[in-house]
Image (cartoon, rainbow, N blue to C red):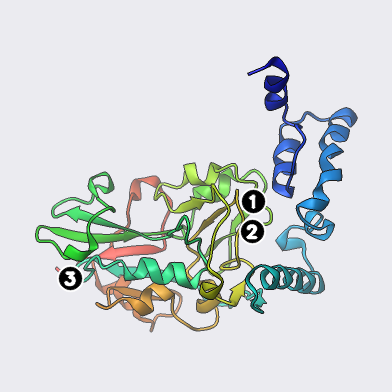
Amino acid sequence: MSEENKENNDNPLNTGPISRRDFLKRGAVLTSGITAMVAALSPLKQLEDTFDMEEFVQKHYKELTPKEMEGVLKRIAKKVEKKYGTTPNVQDIKPQEGVEFSYALNLSRCIGCRRCVHACVDENNQSRSPEVQYIRVLKMPQGTMDMEKGDHHYNVKKVPEEGHFYMPVQCHQCEKPPCVKVCPVEATWQEPDGITVIDYDWCIGCRYCEAACPYWARRFNFSEPSIPKEKINPNMNYLSNRPRSKGVMEKCHFCLQRTREGKLPACLEVCPTGSRTFGNILDPESEISYILKNKRVFVLKEEAGTLPRFFYYFDK
């Protein structure tokens, strides 16, 4: 490599196509002062080729007024229609008061069929090539809960296998989420109903949250997500299943575009054995409350102190 090329590669302000995310990354490494600020703003002239200025100057989600959010949703719908040829219904569904979602999974019933994995992919507009999956199903040897001994590359045609049980793992929507603490730009946070969300427009792809998660529940888009036009789910929500872009994190969000409207998560609906239970833990009459009161439930990696809202149990 020539000295000139080496210098260009080492330069954080090296020109070329740039996105808002790249701009924020470069700005994050600059020191304070007028000179640094001018240097950080120098790539602005290239932004027009990547996205419009409205997207670039968009406020943080929590600062948007209802009118501003309406404009954001229209802009997203326009981009989706242009790319996929379908008119989406893009919403910003808010949490309901008096609701705190929780999940329970009966490991005695799960047969490792992975139908939950693929239902999740279909519902949440996850990339198909490469395929991004929020749920990992581990084939576990009986007698251990050590995730390191689990195998998620098993042959699904041979399930269930004698001497094993199956343990699906996804985002646990922790009460004390370490992923939120480490985000340098507040692109991820916990909602009042217990769901930890990600604003894909604010994520800078630093992957700190991925490293902080003890459950390996976050996914990073190393390449541009690819979804066949005929596979796109047009029922979208800003903080959940709208299409993502290269360089951002994503994860399970309890299908909030469904659950905040009284429906069940896609993974639960497709489960053939009734292994999954979901509901409002604040409702003492809910099925999830009954399970937590009457079953010997446990959480993964309790020692991490994350206080998950995702519980496991066995029938015996």
Check the image and name the residue furthest to the front.
2
User: Residue 250: image x %, image y %?
Assistant: 53, 56
Whether pointer 1 and pointer 2 mark residues with C-beta atoms closer than 8 Å, the reply is yes
The residue shown at (25%, 50%) is 151
The residue shown at (66%, 76%) is 91
Q: Is residue 48 visible?
A: yes
Q: Which element is circle 1 on?
A: loop
Give me the C-alpha separation between circle 3 and circle 2. 38 Å
Q: Residues within 10 Å of mark 2 (few under 14, many from 20)?
A: some
Please say if 99 is above or below 3. Answer: below
The residue wearing badge 3 is: 315
Give amino acid for label 2. Asp
Q: Is residue 280 visible?
A: no
Label drawn at residue 203: 1
User: Residue 188: image x %, image y %?
Assistant: 60, 54
> Which numbered disc, 3 or 2, marks the residue closer to the eye?
2
Horizontal side, residue 187 vs residue 131: left or right: right
Please say if 51 is above or below 83. Answer: above
Please say if 259 is above or below 222. Answer: below
What is the count of numbered marks?
3
Q: Residues within 10 Å of mark 1 (few under 14, many from 20)?
A: many
Q: Which element is circle 2 on?
A: loop
The residue wearing badge 2 is: 199
Whether pointer 3 and pointer 1 mark residues with C-beta atoms closer than 8 Å, the reply is no
User: Residue 40: image x %, image y %?
Assistant: 82, 36
